Image (tube, helix red, strand yellow):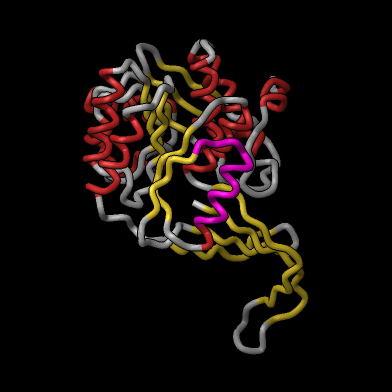
C-alpha cells in the first residue's frame, strides 16, 4: 500500500457544499500496509524482503522508488490492478478525510506461483503475513507459506483479517485486535483481562497457534501461551494512530529474531506502538529510538 498525505490550510467553507476548502501546501507519500511493516524492520536494521502485489501505475512506481531508497528487497508482483492507495487530507494537524483507492486481487494462481518462486531462494528466519483482506493472503497462498515454513523451521507471524482463520492454522504467532476478535467470533467482547484471555485460549486451541497476542488499544496487550501475560499501555498524547500495529509486529519479530525472550519483546513492542502514535503520519521507529524506550 501507499499512504499519501495532502496537507494545507483551511479558512473557508465551499460554496458548493457545507465542507471546508483545503488549500494544498504540500503532499508526500510513504510506505503503508505490509510495506510499512517492512519499512519498520529496515529502520531497525533488519534485512527484509517485501512480497505482495501492486498495479502497473504511477503509484506502484512510487512504491518501488521508496523501497529502493529504504534498502528493502523488492519481490512485488505487478498486475493489472490499482495499487492500493490511502490518501489522507490534513489541515491544522487534523485528518479531515481519507480517500481509498483499492482493488481486490483475484488471481490466486498467479500469486501462488510467484510466491513459490520467491520462497525457493528465501533464506530469512521469519515471515510476517500482514493480511489486509485484499486477496493476496488467500488460503492457497497461506498453505504454501505455512507448509514451506514448517519444512524449513521458519517462524510465521500473522496480522489477521476476516473470519476465515483456518488458513492461519499452525502459525507461530497471531496478533489480532479486539475488533478482529469480535468479527471472528461474531459477538461483542468486553475488553477485560478475563474475557480477552478466554477468547485467546480458544484461538490457540482451535487453530493450533503457539502464541496469541491480542492488542487492546488503551488496555495494552494480552499474550496467551502456556501462561497469560497482560501488558498495560502507556498513556500518551495521540497524534496519529495509522501504522501502530505494523510497528508492533515489526518490533516483536525483530527482537525475537535477535534472541530476546518473547515476554520482553512484547513489552518493547507495546512501548514502540505507544511511541509511534505520538508522531505525525505513518512512522517507522529506528533502532536508536527503540533502545531509548524504557
Q: Looking at the image, can residue 33 be seen?
A: yes
Residue 79, compared with residue 167, is above or below; it is below
Q: Position of residue 260 (x, y in %)?
A: 53, 12
Q: Position of residue 81 (x, y in %)?
A: 37, 61
Q: Is residue 9 left or right of residue 177?
A: right
Residue 215, compared with residue 65, is above or below; it is above
Of all residues, the one furthest to the bottom in this rendering is 15
At a point 55% along the width and 63% down the height, the residue shown is 98
Query: Which quadrant is home to the C terminus?
Result: top right
Q: Position of residue 133 (x, y in %)?
A: 34, 49
Q: Which residue occupies the foreground of this view, 246 or 42?
A: 42
Q: Which residue occupies the foreground of this view, 26 or 52?
A: 52
Q: Which residue occupies the foreground of this view, 26 or 58?
A: 58
Residue 164, compared with residue 263, is above or below; it is below
Q: From the image, give the main secondary structure of the stretch colored magenta.
A: helix
Instruction: Quadrant for residue 208, please give it.
Output: top left
Q: Position of residue 38 (x, y in %)?
A: 52, 36
The span shown in magenta is 60-73
Within the magenta stretch, is there residue 193?
no
At a point 49% along the width and 17% down the height, the residue shown is 257
Q: How many numbered dots are placed on residues in this image?
A: 0
Q: Which residue occupies the foreground of this view, 42 or 272?
A: 42
Residue 171, compared with residue 140, is above or below; it is above
Instruction: Quadrant for residue 5, please give it.
Output: bottom right
Q: Looking at the image, can residue 196 be seen?
A: no
At a point 56% along the width and 34% down the height, the residue shown is 247
At a point 56% along the width and 43% down the height, the residue shown is 67
Instruction: Quadrant for residue 46, please give it.
Output: top right
Amino acid at each position: 500500500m501507499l499512504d499519501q498525505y495532502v496537507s494545507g490550510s483551511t479558512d473557508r467553507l465551499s460554496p458548493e457544499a457545507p465542507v471546508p476548502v483545503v488549500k494544498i501546501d504540500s503532499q508526500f507519500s510513504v510506505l503503508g500496509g505490509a510495506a510499512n511493516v517492512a519499512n519498520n524492520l529496515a529502520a531497525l536494521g533488519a534485512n527484509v524482503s517485501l512480497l505482495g502485489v501492486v498495479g502497473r501505475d504511477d503509484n506502484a512506481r512510487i512504491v518501488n522508488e521508496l523501497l529502493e531508497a529504504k534498502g528493502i528487497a523488492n519481490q512485488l508482483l505487478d498486475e493489472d490492478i490499482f495499487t492500493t492507495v490511502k490518501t489522507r487530507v490534513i489541515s491544522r494537524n487534523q485528518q479531515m478525510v481519507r480517500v481509498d483507492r483499492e482493488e481486490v486481487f483475484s488471481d490466486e494462481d498467479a500469486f501462488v506461483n510467484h510466491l513459490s518462486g520467491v520462497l525457493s531462494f528465501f533464506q530469512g528466519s521469519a515471515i510476517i503475513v500482514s493480511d489486509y483482506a485484499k486477496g493476496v493472503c488467500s488460503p492457497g497462498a497461506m498453505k504454501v507459506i505455512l507448509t514451506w515454513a514448517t519444512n524449513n523451521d521458519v517462524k510465521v507471524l500473522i496480522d489477521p483479517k476476516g473470519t476465515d482463520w483456518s488458513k492461519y492454522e499452525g502459525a507461530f504467532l497471531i496478533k489480532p485486535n479486539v475488533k478482529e476478535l469480535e468479527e471472528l467470533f461474531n459477538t461483542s467482547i468486553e475488553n477485560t483481562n478475563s474475557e480477552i484471555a478466554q477468547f485467546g485460549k480458544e484461538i490457540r486451541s482451535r487453530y493450533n497457534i503457539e502464541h496469541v497476542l491480542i492488542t487492546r488499544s488503551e488496555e495494552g496487550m494480552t499474550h496467551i501461551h502456556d501462561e497469560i501475560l497482560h501488558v498495560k499501555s502507556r498513556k500518551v498524547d495521540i497524534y496519529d494512530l495509522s501504522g501502530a500495529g505494523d510497528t508492533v509486529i515489526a518490533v516483536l519479530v525483530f527482537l525475537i529474531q535477535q534472541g530476546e525472550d518473547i515476554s520482553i519483546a512484547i513489552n518493547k513492542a507495546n512501548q514502540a506502538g505507544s511511541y509511534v502514535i505520538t508522531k505525525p503520519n505513518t512512522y517507522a521507529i529506528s533502532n536508536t529510538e527503540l533502545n531509548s524506550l524504557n
